[in-house]
Image: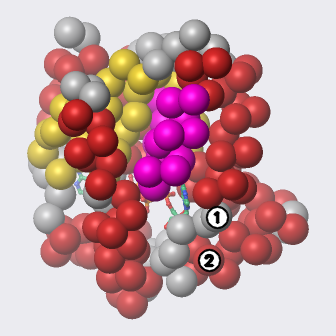
Amino acid sequence: MHVIILGAPGSGKGTQSIEIMQHFSLKHLSTGDMLRAEIAAGSALGLAAKAVMDAGNLVNDDIIIDMVKNQVQSHASGVLFDGFPRTKAQAEALDAMLKELGSEIAHVIQLDVADEEIIKRMLARGREDDNEETIRNRLAVYNEQTAPLIDYYQKAGKLSRISGTGSVAEIFSRIQQILEK
Ligand code: B4P
């Protein structure tokens, strides 16, 4: 079973992914974590990605798709995609990758959180890319480049939209109901 957790930056994708991983045997694949690992390692990819991430923009599709491809091939039994795909090109590449493996996405869970709540959460998180100017740009980039995926997965009959407001446990129980169906 392959699952995507979709939502605006700071909507709690990473937080819920930890809960999902503990209950379902899925490999957690976070492109944000992978990019931060590259930055920490000081690789050429990390250096290039850092400036893009600090500005709140998206890292180049080809780089991201290559990064994900290796992981998907070695975890064909079930992946939880967190923060990927973020563009239509990434979504189409993912569909093609899975098709090659004779597989497909089973569910897409979309976390719905109001912008004001997101800004509050991210300012409290205080990661390097969590200043107000960057957050506002990330929300604009999300609306422009990632939000069209809601329609993409809805048309494919795979989307479940849930409220991402409430306690971490409350939100996880909404997700659990969907995944256990
Ligand atoms: P990501 O690492 O994916 O991170 P995110 O969207 O900021 O956060 P997430 O939704 O996981 O929120 P979290 O659980 O942490 O992206 C970082 C950057 O990497 C992107 O801007 C982009 O530049 C680049 N990137 C990554 N993937 C890419 C791709 N595919 N293509 C191109 N570029 C890519 O929660 C946020 C905060 O809220 C935390 O402090 C948490 O404790 C708190 N919180 C969570 N749930 C809560 C709740 N229920 N109530 C109150 N607070 C809560």
Q: Residue at x 26, y 46 (%)?
A: 150
Q: Is mark 2 within 8 Å of ligand 1?
A: yes
Tag 2: residue type? Val
Residue 63 visible to the viewer: yes
Q: Is residue 120 magenta?
A: no
* In front: label 2 or label 1: 1
- The residue at which mark 2 appears reads as 52
Tell me if residue 161 comes above or below residue 98 in the rendering: below
Give the quadrant of residue 101.
top right
Give the quadrant of residue 100.
top right
Between marks 2 and 1, how big is the CA–CA gap?
9 Å
The picture places residue 27, in percent across and down from the top left corner, at 57, 25
Tell me if residue 171 comes above or below residue 37 in the rendering: above
Tell me if residue 88 comes above or below residue 137 in the rendering: above
Q: Image quadrant for the C terminus? A: top left
Ligand 1 - quadrant of the structure image: bottom left
The numbered mark, 2 or 1, whose residue comes first in the sequence reads 2
Tell me if residue 105 comes above or below residue 65 in the rendering: above
Viewer-closest of 168 and 113: 113
Question: Callout 1 environment at 10 Å: few (<14), some (14 to 19), or many (20+)?
Answer: few
Q: Which mark is residue 102?
A: none
Give the quadrant of residue 38.
bottom right
The picture places residue 161, in percent across and down from the top left corner, at 16, 39
Secondary structure category for the residue under label 1: loop
Q: Residue furthest bottom?
A: 133
Q: Is mark 1 within 8 Å of ligand 1?
A: yes
Viewer-closest of 39 and 18: 39
Q: Is residue 72 left or right of residue 21?
A: right
Magenta-highlighted residues: 80-96
- The residue at which mark 1 appears reads as 60
Question: Do the residues under discs 2 and 1 have CB atoms within 8 angstroms?
Answer: yes
